[in-house]
Image (spheres, helix red, strand yellow):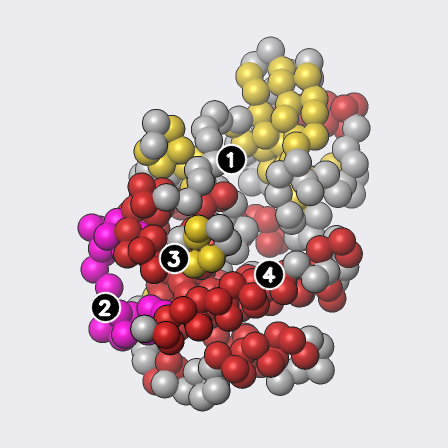
Amino acid sequence: MGDYTKLQKSEAQEILKLYGKGEVTNFRALSLGISNSNYDVKTPEGRFLLKVSNDKDHIDLSKEQEILHRLESEKFPYSLIPFTTKNNKLVYEFKDFSGVLYPFVDGIPPGPSDQTCFEIGKALATLHRVKNIEGLRPHEEVGYGENEILKFVDSPNCPDDFKEAFQDIFPDNLEDYNENTWEQGLIHGDLYYDNTLFDNNQLAYLLDFEQAGIGPYILDIGISMSGTCLEKGRVLPELVASYLDGYESIRPLQGGEIEHLTDAILIGLFSIALWRIKRFKLKQLNPEMADSYKELLYKAYLFHHRINKK
């Protein structure tokens, strides 16, 4: 769902005034997003995507926008750049609302395919080539890597099925994986295929940098593959190969990244499962999705068993 915060048209009008974008002529809620409520807004000056944050404060939102504006300065070709307010602020504040205004862009969220995987892999590697990252937030402020997962497994809040699945799949508690020193840089943190827009089978935009920050590339690759290289809800090795072809056309995998790619995909599934537990089960942002993490555990089991049969 994308409309947790119920914004009225009159309130949207007041927010648009902060940007000097004219009178609202059309306004509708969109069923997109998890952490945000999203609205399609039209004025005589254009069409806009108005986002209202449901679970992030002004500081977190500002750090996300800093990343997007840094990407703009680095001429990253796939990011959608938000507007700043008339007072040159990255994030608007109105009543109890805070959020961001984007241009509304046309495009199609793709279905999983070899071409989709190749294009997304290529785009992620292009992101990993961005070098001017000084001062940007660390990924662990907003996302979960292997160390956060290990800590959660030993915490009293950890659901039994999450703990059991992790210990079944990683009986060594990632000891071998953590012996590596992973190359780090700016990562997206949530690049599933539904966080992209395509135009004529070519990737046009990467969306939702809410979990972006400085972190290990291998984690980003694993998360992205786990939610992109899918057929009928299962991670498919053939699509992983297509993704890797796209990625390595820009940045070849380094050292242990090759050896631990399967581990990274599994960690990616546990990472997003933990993200869902934190928001929907523990914070109760959307109680109807409290058990949605279970589908990721199921995907992890299926992929683990498939790989180990070979």
Dot placed on the residue nearer the N-terminal end, 3 or 1 = 1
Report the amino acid beneath label 3. Leu
Residue 295: mark: 4
Say left or right for 202 vs 157. left
Callout 3: few (<14), some (14-19), or many (20+) C-alpha neighbours within 10 Å?
some
Name the mark nearer the viewer: 2 or 4. 4
Q: Which residue position is annotated with label 3?
A: 236
Image location (x, y in percent) of residue 249: 20, 50
C-alpha span from label 4 to label 3: 16 Å
Report the amino acid beneath label 4. Glu
What residue sits 48% from the left and 87% below the top? 171
Callout 1: few (<14), some (14-19), or many (20+) C-alpha neighbours within 10 Å?
some
- Decide which of 24, 258 is in the foreground and name it: 258
Q: Which residue position is annotated with label 1?
A: 82
C-alpha span from label 1 to label 2: 33 Å
C-alpha span from label 3 to label 1: 35 Å
Quarter of image, res 68: top left
Q: Are marks 1 and 4 in contact (CB under 8 Å)?
A: no
Q: Which residues are magenta?
A: 243-262
Q: Main secondary structure of the magenta part?
A: helix
Dot placed on the residue nearer the N-terminal end, 4 or 3 = 3
Position of the C terminus, as image quadrant, is bottom left
C-alpha span from label 2 to label 4: 31 Å
What residue sits 34% from the left and 60% below the top? 237
Q: Which residue position is annotated with label 2?
A: 254
Image location (x, y in percent) of residue 246: 26, 49
Report the amino acid beneath label 2. Gln
- Look at the image and say whether residue 208 sits in the magenta stretch: no
Dot placed on the residue nearer the N-terminal end, 2 or 3 = 3
